[in-house]
Amino acid sequence: MQFVDELVQQATDVGMIVNGRKTKELLIASVIKDPPPPVNLSGTPVERVTTFKLLGVHVASDLKWTQHIDAITSKAASRLHFLKQLKRSGAGRDDLLYFYVTVIRTVLEYACPVWHSSLTAAQTKALQSLQRRALRVIFQDYDYTMSLIRAGLETLESRRDQLTERFFHRSVLPEMSCLLSDKRDPFVTDRLRHPRNFETLKSRTAKFQNSLIPYYLTHFLKAYNLFLVFFCFFCTASILCVNDIVR
């Protein structure tokens, strides 16, 4: 393929060598129905795979997260053994809780802004069961709800919601002007009870609607606009109060 040869040439120009034996090809979604010819790098055929681990996240050709959730739940479950060993050795609750938060929960939340919006109910339940098991070890005399209160923790789903929204405001929103559609006419939005300044992305499938960017635009942009309204209202009210005091 011409674009592959151009890519290899660009890498060579900057002093990089593309290793065909270490390179993988992953076909996404509809391309699988009509696959292109195999890719060769400098005469070396590139292996075509259905899943690939990229920066610790298992990406599948069908854009589902089954393999990634299975991988992180298995990894976290194996670390529960060490939590039980610490409990048997006489470690206190604070130490056990610190071990869970830093060693086990971090595995269950790694890169969650990427995959949180596309989880199924069964996958959400599988992740939550790991926290239930860990808190049962730490607070064996309490049920799950009381254990959360005593530990000062939240459900993993609530945590992922907060982490995803924080990531949106810190990293996505400042750079997403190219992703937003045209702003709606203020003459129209001013007449609406629940206005949206931007049109939502059109999608034909639930998979795309629940993917990263459409999910952000649907759930967090509206909240961000509401925050701006309240902020402007607060500033205006503060200015009026100051004027009254000065008078």
Image (tube, rainbow, N blue to C red):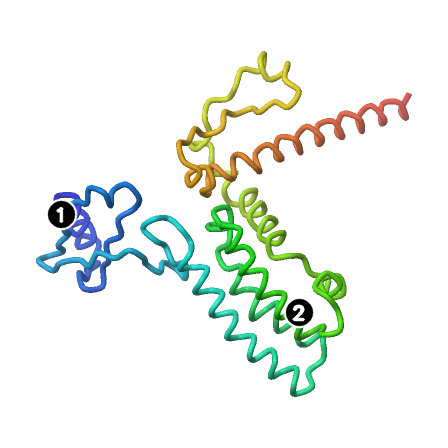
Q: Position of residue 114 (x, y in %)?
A: 46, 50
- The answer to which quarter of the image holds residue 100 is bottom right
Amino acid type of the residue that numbered disc 1 sits on in the rendered structure: Pro
In the image, taking residue 223 as reference, residue 28 lies left or right, namely left
Q: Secondary structure at mark 1?
A: loop
Q: Position of residue 127 (x, y in %)?
A: 54, 60
Q: Quadrant location of the N terminus? A: top left
In the image, taking residue 46 as reference, residue 67 lies left or right, namely right
3D distance between C-alphas at marks 2 and 1? 51 Å
Give the residue drawn at x 58%, y 63%: 129
Mark 2, residue position: 135
Seen from the viewer's position, the closer of residues 167 and 150 is 150
Give the residue drawn at x 39%, y 31%: 204
Mark 1, other Cα within 10 Å: few <14 / some 14–19 / many ≥20:
few
Seen from the viewer's position, the closer of residues 16 and 89 is 89
Q: Position of residue 52 (x, y in %)?
A: 32, 58
Q: Which mark is residue 37?
A: 1
- The answer to which quarter of the image holds residue 196 is top right
**In the rendered structure, which disc, 2 or 1, sits on the residue that comes first in sequence?**
1
